[in-house]
Amino acid sequence: MRSLLERLSRRSPESGRHDGFAELAEWGDWVWPVGWSSAVAEGDPSLIEKSWNSIGTLAAGPIADVDRAGAIALRQWPLSVDTWFRVGERWIHPSRQSGVQQRRVDGLPIIETRARTGPAEVIFTTWADEGGGSRGRVLHSVDNRTDLPIAVATVVRPFTAVGRGRAVSMRVVGRQVIVDGMPLVELPTAAADVAGGSATNGDVHLSLADELVGGDSVSADDGSATLAAIWPLAAGSTATISVVDGRHPVESPLTPVDQVAAGWKAHLDGAAVISLPGWPDHLWASLLSGLLLRVEESSAPLGAGQALRRDDALVAAALAGSGLYDAAAIELERLLGGLTDGSVARRDWPLVGAALARSATEPATRSWSRQSAPAAAALGSLAELEVAPATSRLIARAMGWAAGPRAATDVASIDPQPAPPGMVDRLVDCGVELADEPSTPRGVDPGPVIRSAGTTWRWERDGAGDSPHARAVIADRIRRAACRETADGLDIAPGFTSAWLGRPVDVEHLPTAWGLLSFSIRWHGARPALLWEIAPLDDVEALTLTSMVIDTDFASSALAGEALLEAPEVGP
């Protein structure tokens, strides 16, 4: 079985070179997106650094990707929007600066980028709101933290996150930047100056450096048009641009970033909360919000050339395992449709069955009557494999929802076989515990996982720069470190290590095969005090609570209580 870090770093072949990318090396001195230098020199877009963070809304899914210098690559346009600024006589291009810092605000799809040069500091914050209806709208604020006014250049570029884009004409009309006849960007104020560029005439940054501004438009038949709209920003002030995505005019007001953050937190209120030693405070929110973004995205994650529909079983299982059942149901509807139309191969049906089984931890019964046949088929394919008793219990419960009580009873009569070797890791990633070997590791070292995520907690997998499938695997591992489902109950903190000694542990409303689990660990010297509460599922008559890694002698059948455990014996 491969390690967690090996799973996260899985790669897939690129889907091929992008049209015209090799020509970029001939364009001369351009300000390339961050991490593009080697790719441009070699003419190979597979060498692009995939350091972006996806942003979007629940209704629209991901609509843009922010690179580590704050540039915004749009999903629906073959373009990106960058922000440069001038302090005194010098233009600052964040993609060429070494002191740029970035974070994900409270773990949510809100990206803050800080660019410093000398005493000057400018902060970009990028988020999305519902102003564009089902398509969403990108908002990008510029906060001038210097003591002097600055000039800001909103620069529209013929680049996507993964390669060359295209724009034939650009012009500024009032506060709007019009691209190929459609409004793209709305500025906070009318542009004071405009500069343009192209592959033939050179990049727009050269025009800015030489103060060759004027006019209001640029065109390039080869699709290399780029334009900078320059506007002033006073010292200590903030202004926001919006990507209007072809809508003209845009009547809905811009949603403040704190209001969007509150909305995301409200969507996560019904989810489990897991706080374990060694894992950053906002990581759990980052994992879940990234999974929610995937729900409305029907195509492969950006950059993943050969991601398969089956991989979304990871997302569905992780959402259900976190208590986000409605979002999980949307993913499952799509997966079950894949069983019907053949886009999910027969050999991958157990993965869909695993996600269905994990959704059976929902206290209320969910009907799969519209897709009962594929649901029963997926669950039956999983029941044919040797899984742990708790997973078998969930299979039977889900089968009852899909095909009725008799089908649920028939699950017990199936003679299971060992899972094929190539299926083991994928089943484990979907939350399945196999019969022959507990798949829960004794402690997941957060260090390598956190270091591989950067400052914004994003992971690459299968070529995707911000992979929801990687997020699903990590969420599952954190859940497994908090609790293991056993044949007759729940085992608390199987991931306990010496790094947890003396540190608080809090888990709230975690869905399990036996019910919703909440517990906390506090310390009395060397001894941990365990407080717990379990809201059992309606078909649970009795269960046993243990904590085998901390105290092998502890066991309780109480649904709520507290106990002072023995001092744990753990290695370094």
Image: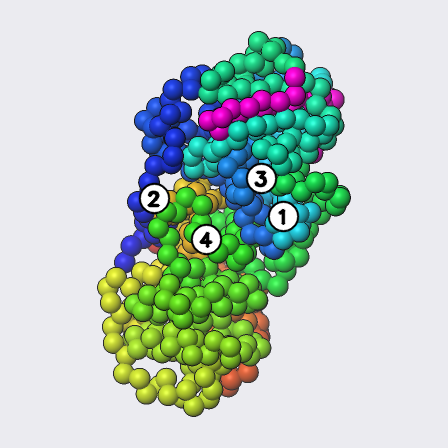
Q: How is the image coloured?
A: rainbow
Q: Quadrant of the N terminus?
A: bottom left
The kind of secondary structure element at disc 1 is: loop
- Residue at mark 3 to residue at mark 2: CA–CA distance: 28 Å
Kindly indicate whether the residue at mark 1 contacts the one at mark 2 (C-beta within 8 angstroms): no
Q: Which residues are magenta?
A: 215-240
Q: Residue at x 52, y 68 (%)?
A: 329
**Residue 274 position in % (x across, y down):** 53, 58
Kindly indicate whether the residue at mark 2 contacts the one at mark 3 (C-beta within 8 angstroms): no
**Residue 246 position in % (x across, y down):** 63, 41
Q: Earlier in the sequence, mark 4 or mark 2?
A: 2
**Residue 483 position in % (x across, y down):** 45, 66
The residue under label 3 is 111
- Whether residue 181 is visible, yes or no, is yes
In the image, is 188 to the left or to the right of 111?
right
- Residue at mark 4 to residue at mark 2: CA–CA distance: 14 Å
- Residue at mark 1 to residue at mark 3: CA–CA distance: 16 Å
Q: Earlier in the sequence, mark 1 or mark 3?
A: 3
- Residue at mark 1 to residue at mark 4: CA–CA distance: 17 Å
- Residue at mark 2 to residue at mark 1: CA–CA distance: 28 Å
The residue under label 1 is 136
In the image, is 410 to the left or to the right of 515?
left
- Residue at mark 3 to residue at mark 4: CA–CA distance: 23 Å
The tag on residue 15 is 2
The kind of secondary structure element at disc 3 is: strand
The kind of secondary structure element at disc 2 is: loop
Structural crowding at the residue carrying mark 4, measured as other residues with C-alpha within 10 Å and reported as few (<14), some (14–19) or many (≥20): few
Q: Amino acid at mark 3?
A: Ile
Is 17 above or below relative to 92? below
Residue 111 counted in the magenta span: no
Q: Earlier in the sequence, mark 3 or mark 4?
A: 3
